[in-house]
Image (spheres, grey):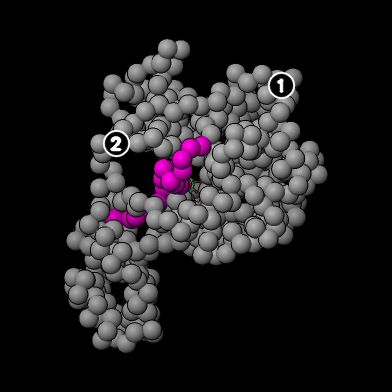
């Protein structure tokens, strides 16, 4: 233990962790020692500010929100498409491009018992989401003659199961040295009065720090350094659950490079003003994604001279970064967003409690908060039916069923051409 027992207790008292102390004092000596060792590594000033800031990042601010310009892929000429694709193809062929799939989420809404990527998406060919994504890398190999590096961000909870899933499936026939797993960071969860929590395994309750934690962990785990050594300059980052995402898209890379931008994001136009997706905007002159609650009903309904929604560029978590941006932003702080979630815990009597409603705060960084650190970025508007088939819910909207339909419709269409 870095600090002795009394020092840690004193620190806990200083930061008003009295409820937590009571629970810890009921644990047996082995568990207590373990948990206090975890506590000794906590930055309590950070915990204090996380607690004080609860809800603040979700408040409406007085920022100046303006529409952002997007390049509409469907309006590009054949020459433009060729120009961009040639630029991107060169980058891919020179091994300067890699993909990161963020697969550290909990997938609570889908309710699948296992990593979301292991969910059987293609029920005809018995292919998991991971295999469907891997097919895109194999296709890219056939086109460009290179095995693109595939980095997969997991969480402490699903890492072992994810790695094992790839192993038993023989990495879906992709070279295993090209698939690299890393585990995302964690933050302690807090009770409504700001106390730490003992989880059902008598350990400190920690939870994933959100997809925006990716920049910090890439730096901490020295993955950025490895990428640089490999000569990687451009990195696509996307969620695990969009089966239509074009992970290796020379056009996307080419547009960013040609426009001298260090980041790019794909958008799809919102279905309707009420659709609950974040939208790309300019916030105080910088690119940003604002949640639907951050813009008024009137603004969400406003149209431009072309009759399109002025604030309609839906963010679909398909983004591209130059390694320079990752290096720079990994050292900067992103805001934490708090969410009130359910979490099992040990109470002061030493009993394990499994609440049926939310009881604790979880703190997450959002990837798109990094955009505000940039002067500008490219927004490439793509067609929903070509690039966006998310799997979020077990049934209905954004479910395996709706994604299968979109996926099959798309491939039936392109195979007919
Ligand atoms: P979502 O916000 O949709 O969350 O993540 P989720 O965990 O998949 O699903 P719910 O909300 O619990 O139902 C969008 C993408 O970001 C990844 C997810 O794996 C998904 O690909 N993600 C999310 C992470 O990698 N880490 C996180 O901490 C959160």
Q: Which residue is rendered at x = 38% and y = 16% of the image?
A: 303
Which residues are the magenta region? 359-377
Query: Dot 1 corresponds to which residue?
Result: 79
For the residue pair 55 and 119, the one nearer the viewer reads as 55
Question: Quadrant location of residue 162?
Answer: bottom right
Please, is residue 340 above or below residue 256 in the view? below
Q: Quadrant of the N terminus?
A: bottom left
Q: Is residue 274 visible?
A: yes
Mark sitting earlier along the chain (1/2): 2
Tell me the element at label 1.
helix
Judge whether residue 390 can be spotted in this image. no
User: Which mark, residue 63?
Assistant: 2
Residue at screen point 71% across, 43% down: 91
User: Does the closest atom of ligand 1 sit within 8 Å of the Cβ of label 1?
Assistant: no
Q: Residues within 10 Å of mark 2 (few under 14, many from 20)?
A: few
Q: Position of residue 149 (x, y in %)?
A: 68, 52
Q: Residue at x 28, y 21 (%)?
A: 298
Could you say where residue 33 lies in the image, as x and y percent from the top left? 35, 83
């Amino acid at each position: 233990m870095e600090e002795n027992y009394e020092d840690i207790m004193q620190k806990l008292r200083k930061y008003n962790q009295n409820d937590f102390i009571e629970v810890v004092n009921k644990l047996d000596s082995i568990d207590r020692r373990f948990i206090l060792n975890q506590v000794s590594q906590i930055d309590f000033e950070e915990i204090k500010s996380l607690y004080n800031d609860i809800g603040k990042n979700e408040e409406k601010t007085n920022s100046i929100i303006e529409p952002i310009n997007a390049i509409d892929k469907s309006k590009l000429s054949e020459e433009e498409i060729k120009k961009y694709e040639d630029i991107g193809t060169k980058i891919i062929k020179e091994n300067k491009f890699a993909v990161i799939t963020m697969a550290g989420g909990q997938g609570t809404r889908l309710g699948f018992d296992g990593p979301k990527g292991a969910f059987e998406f293609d029920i005809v060919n018995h292919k998991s989401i991971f295999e469907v994504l891997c097919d895109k890398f194999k296709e890219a190999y056939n086109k460009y003659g290179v095995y693109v590096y595939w980095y997969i961000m997991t969480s402490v909870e699903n890492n072992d199961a994810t790695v094992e899933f790839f192993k038993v499936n023989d990495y879906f026939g992709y070279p295993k040295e090209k698939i690299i797993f890393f585990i995302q960071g964690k933050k302690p969860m807090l009770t409504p009065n700001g106390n730490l929590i003992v989880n059902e395994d008598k350990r400190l309750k920690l939870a994933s720090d959100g997809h925006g934690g990716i920049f910090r962990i890439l730096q901490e785990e020295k993955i950025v350094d490895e990428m640089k050594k490999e000569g990687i300059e451009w990195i696509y980052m996307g969620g695990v659950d969009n089966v239509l995402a074009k992970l290796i898209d020379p056009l996307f890379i080419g547009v960013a490079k040609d426009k001298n931008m260090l980041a790019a994001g794909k958008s799809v136009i919102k279905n309707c003003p009420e659709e609950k997706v974040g939208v790309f905007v300019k916030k105080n002159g910088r690119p940003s994604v604002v949640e639907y609650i951050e813009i008024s009903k009137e603004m969400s309904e406003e149209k431009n001279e072309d009759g399109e929604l002025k604030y309609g560029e839906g963010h679909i978590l398909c983004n591209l970064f130059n390694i320079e941006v990752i290096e720079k932003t990994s050292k900067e702080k992103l805001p934490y967003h708090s969410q009130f979630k359910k979490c099992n815990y040990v109470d002061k009597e030493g009993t394990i409690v499994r609440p049926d409603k939310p009881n604790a705060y979880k703190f997450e960084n959002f990837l798109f908060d990094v955009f505000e650190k940039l002067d500008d970025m490219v927004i490439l508007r793509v067609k929903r039916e070509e690039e966006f088939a998310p799997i979020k819910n077990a049934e209905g909207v954004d479910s395996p069923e709706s994604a299968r339909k979109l996926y099959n419709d798309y491939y039936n269409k392109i195979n007919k051409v």
